[in-house]
Image: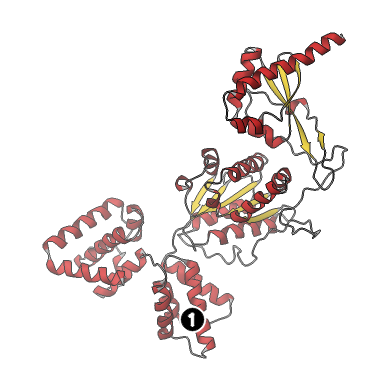
Amino acid sequence: MKEVYQQMKKKHEEIWDKCVAVIKDNIPYQSFKTWFEPIVPIRLENNILTIQVPSQFFYEWLEEHYIHLLKKTIKKELGTAGRLEYSIIMEKPSYENPNTITVNYPTTNKKNVDNKPVIMPLDLTNGNGKTREIPNPFIIPGLKKLKVESQLVESYSFDNFVEGDCNRLARSAGWAVAENPGKTAFNPMLIYSNVGLGKTHLAHAIGLQVKNNFPDKIVLYVQTEQFINQYIDSVRNNNHNDFVHFYQMIDVLILDDVQFIAGKEKTQDVFFHIFNHLHQNNKQIILTSDKPPVELKGMEPRLLSRFKWGLAADLQPPDLETRIAILQKKLYADGITMPNEVVEYLAYNITTNIREMEGALISILAQASLNKKAITLDLAKQMIDKFVKNTTREISIDYIQKVICDYFGISVDLINSKTRKREIVQARQMAMFFSKKHTKNSLASIGLQCGNKDHATVLHACRTVNNLMETDRQFKAHIEEIDKKLRF
């Protein structure tokens, strides 16, 4: 029996040596040295070769990147019935003991090369049944505070988030997520928009509402740049596993500006594994980005596909009424009164960035307070003219309609009405023409905001304006004057 055992022991080593020889010829030397030299063959039973790998992360990497190569080599040496199983060792934290201990996972957790990789349960013990603590990457070295702070801003709540047509879908979905985190179809929830339109505010609002509804859940808001720096520190300090395990314990993870991991392959890889674990365990993931998933460049396809699993909700520039409501709400919250004409002037002139609009409001208040002046329309014009000239301002459909209506002396309500009067129809067509020329809105969106028309009507309007410009000198002069006013 002893001789048979020795033969079996030699057999599994021989088989693995033959597999290694094939693998070595098919991958770069550095990859082989990193991912295959540390592997130790343990046993061969019933055509099942068991190998020992240093960590769960190591196992997941092999399954993700070398599954097909492993499958081919095992079947070459053991035949079509050949299988591969893993035994994983878990590193103990350096502050306890630099040595490693073997974690014998139950048979049900072993994976063969025909199975789809599945994240294994976290092992949070020291091998003696006692739970160990995972270091918190948000704690400054030397401090002993272990509680996970959410890093949420209390003022960024749903109560302070003004709802409008521009954000209604995203807000409604965010509220649904906050009421039932991790258990709706909106997981992950990706909120995207240009800068200054409220995606960070909405992400914080969801997190705050979750904390109100479920005080026991761990909610964490983290900027992507901070996440990247923590990962780099974990590699430098050789505690990569603890970094991953910390994030795998979060119930609601909010990652702001996820586009910043583009091009960072190793950071994307570690986030991929964290994402998988959280999603498989019904934990909520909330992401923000300045672009929709289809426009994110430099992202690994496997990660990008996961961003599309849930809901991608966009925030559009707010319309005039929403901008006025935002300003009034801020003034009310600060206990300040301001003439309506000043509020409207602000809302008319800063149209594409809520953050800039609020900044301009603060500048007016500061100027009035420091110089002990009354808040008047003239003061607002002096401040806003300087402010707008120093910022890149995109032209909105609302602004186009206002300029055209002021030019012809008609009301905005008329241009959006169903009247068929020639002068109103012509003004409406001009609004559609300039909206197509100066904004990034789709034809359907332009039609919706210009009298609730369809995209075909917008195309007809643009053709009509172009034809009239070629045949009617006075009409062309009107177009050129309005264009100058829009560009000024």
The amino acid pointed to by label 1 is Ile
Q: Could you tell me which residue is drawn at 68 percent across and 34 percent down? A: 58
* Circle 1: element type: helix
Asked where in the image residue 48 lies, by quadrant, the reply is top right
Vertical order, 64 against 408 (above or below) = above
x and y, in percent, of residue 158 in the image: 59, 62
x and y, in percent, of residue 24 in the image: 61, 24
Q: Residues within 10 Å of mark 1 (few under 14, many from 20)?
A: many
Say which of 143 and 161 sits in front.
Answer: 143
The reply, left or right, for residue 448 in relation to residue 129 is: left
x and y, in percent, of residue 12 in the image: 74, 17
Q: Quadrant of the N terminus?
A: top right
Asked where in the image residue 318 lies, by quadrant, the reply is bottom left
Name the residue at the bottom extreme.
Answer: 372
Q: Quadrant of the C terminus?
A: bottom left
Which residue is tagged 1?
364
Vertical order, 413 against 262 (above or below) = below
x and y, in percent, of residue 153 in the image: 64, 64
Say which of 419 and 17 sits in front.
Answer: 17
Vertical order, 35 against 191 (above or below) = above
Name the residue at the front extreme.
Answer: 29
The reply, left or right, for residue 385 in relation to residue 240 is: left
Q: Could you tell me which residue is drawn at 60 percent across and 51 percent down? A: 177
Q: Could you tell me which residue is drawn at 60 percent across and 41 percent down? A: 269
Colour scheme: secondary structure
Say which of 325 and 355 sits in front.
Answer: 355
Q: Could you tell me which residue is drawn at 55 percent across and 81 percent down? A: 336
Q: Can residue 118 be seen by looking at this rendering?
A: no
The reply, left or right, for residue 15 in relation to residue 300 is: right
Q: Can residue 170 be seen by looking at this rendering?
A: yes
Query: How many discs mark residues in the rendered view?
Result: 1
